Image (cartoon, rainbow, N blue to C red):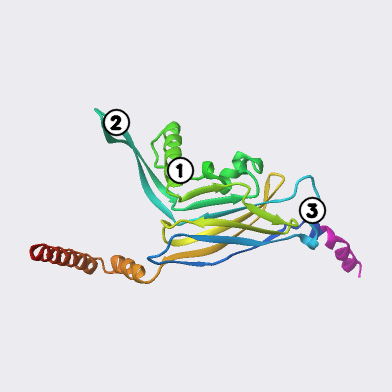
Amino acid sequence: MRRALTLALLAPLAMGAAAPVLVPDVSTRDVQIAYSFTGAELLLFGAILYPGGRVPQGDRPADIVVVVKGPPESIVVREKEKVAGIWVNADRMRYRSAPSFYAIASARPIEQMVDERTRAIYELGLDSLQLSPAAGTSADDQARFARGFVALRERAGLYRETPNAVEITDDVLYRASITIPARVPVGKFTAETFLIRDGRVLAAAVRDIEIRKSGFERFVAIAANEASLWYGLAAVLLSVGFGWAAGALWRRF
């Protein structure tokens, strides 16, 4: 009896000390790319479940950050120099693992939420990506190439950082929109959601997203990967056929 009473008295304290839980979701987990694909809007939404159903009181409410990442890839970045009036390849940097797509949306600027160390741990922000450069390069070279690489991806629409883009209702419900460009790579993506309060990440959750080709584009991609020899022969025969047809039409007219 005494033990049961003690547990009952300690239950509210245990609930108050428990961490909140994120319940996230996305508008679609299967994005199909056809010949007419011009991009898509991905809606990320969800709720924050606080222990006991009570929102903690404080000077500043909790913040939400959502991050959508594409599958990692190995890539080589080349730096060009102008020599005798001609642009030529100079130095280069190889990254063993860089996200093929990265988009982050937050309730306010990331640097106002967490410190630099926390941003680096969770890769929150374009300046905090862990790109895994090849060894043997100086810190200055790594920083220069990283800035150039991120700038290239931003211009292509594959990297994006959008502050003040997460709407939070009653400190419980949230929603954010991420733009998927037409040139997005295919593969398994992840949608990560982070709950941040007082400079600390209190909770995190992940949802998987599949972006894949459909229709004739899917058939071509599968043929190129699984039957590369026949795919190459078919491409050569088609090229020869179209060339012969064009020549025949030219001679007739």
Q: SS for tag 1?
A: helix
Horizontal relation, residue 187 to residue 173: left or right: left
The quarter of the rendered structure image containing the N terminus is bottom right
Query: In the rendered structure, which amino acid carries the disc numbered 1?
Result: Val
Residue lying farthest top?
A: 84
Residue at image mark 3: 56
Kindly identify the residue that appears in the image at 12 percent across and 65 percent down.
249
Kindly identify the residue that appears in the image at 80 percent across and 47 percent down.
58
**Image mark count:** 3
Magenta portion: prevailing SS class: helix
Up the image or down, 98 lies above or below 247; here it is above
Residue at image mark 2: 82
Up the image or down, 193 lies above or below 139; here it is below
Q: Earlier in the sequence, mark 3 or mark 1?
A: 3
Q: Earlier in the sequence, mark 3 or mark 2?
A: 3
Question: Residue 187 appears in which quarter of the rendering?
Answer: bottom left
Q: Residues within 10 Å of mark 2 (few under 14, many from 20)?
A: few
Q: Residues within 10 Å of mark 1 (few under 14, many from 20)?
A: some
Q: CA distance from mark 1 to mark 2?
A: 22 Å
Horizontal relation, residue 237 to residue 131: left or right: left
Q: SS for tag 2?
A: strand
Residue bounds of the magenta highlight = 1-13
